[in-house]
Image: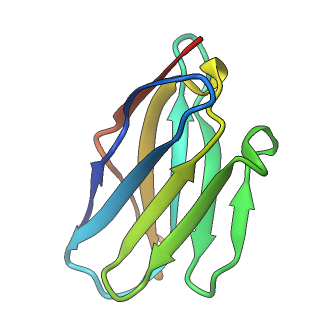
Amino acid sequence: QVQPVESGGGLVQAGGSLRLSCAASGSIFSINAMGWFRQAPGKQQELVARIFRGGTTNYADSVKGRFTISRDNASNTVYLQMNSLKPEDTAVYYCNIITAVGSSSWGQGTQVTVSS
């Protein structure tokens, strides 16, 4: 069982930056994709960014040009650098890991709050 362990998040003013980290622990054989989702109050969960083992990335349109996802395959850690944060980025951010056999694991979530 793979368990994502998240760190980072917090309170920042609009225009500021934060970095989220997520390390995979547990029985790790092969990880296919690591990514971040978020859920704001009263809204559905949405994909923020995802990176695949080969380096391919996907971003939500709302964060393109502001957020950067990166991955350290050696340590099974994924990072989300968030710049030019906006109040609408306020949400609980969840790390998601998909293994090569298709299993999906979620972190406990970390709060990101952007004040105007």
Identified at 82% across, 44% down, the residue is 61
The answer to whether one can see residue 1 in this image is no
Identified at 45% across, 61% down, the residue is 79
In this view, 15 is above or below 80: above
Q: Can you tell which quarter of the image residue 92 is in? A: top left
Identified at 37% across, 57% down, the residue is 21
Q: Position of residue 66 (x, y in %)?
A: 71, 47
Out of 1 and 83, give the one closest to the viewer.
83
Q: Position of residue 47 (x, y in %)?
A: 63, 45
Q: Position of residue 13 (x, y in %)?
A: 52, 21
Q: Can you tell which quarter of the image residue 12 is in? A: top left
Q: In the figure, is residue 38 to the left or right of 96?
A: right
In this view, 16 is above or below 23: above
For the C terminus, give its image quadrant: top right
In this view, 96 is above or below 97: above
In this view, 35 is above or below 13: below
In this view, the residue farthest toward the left is 26
In this view, the residue farthest toward the right is 61
Out of 19 and 52, give the one closest to the viewer.
19
The chosen color scheme is: rainbow
For the N terminus, give its image quadrant: bottom left
Q: Position of residue 101 (x, y in %)?
A: 45, 80
Total numbered labels: 0
Identified at 72% across, 43% down, the residue is 63
Q: Can you tell which quarter of the image residue 105 is in? A: bottom left
The answer to whether one can see residue 58 in this image is yes
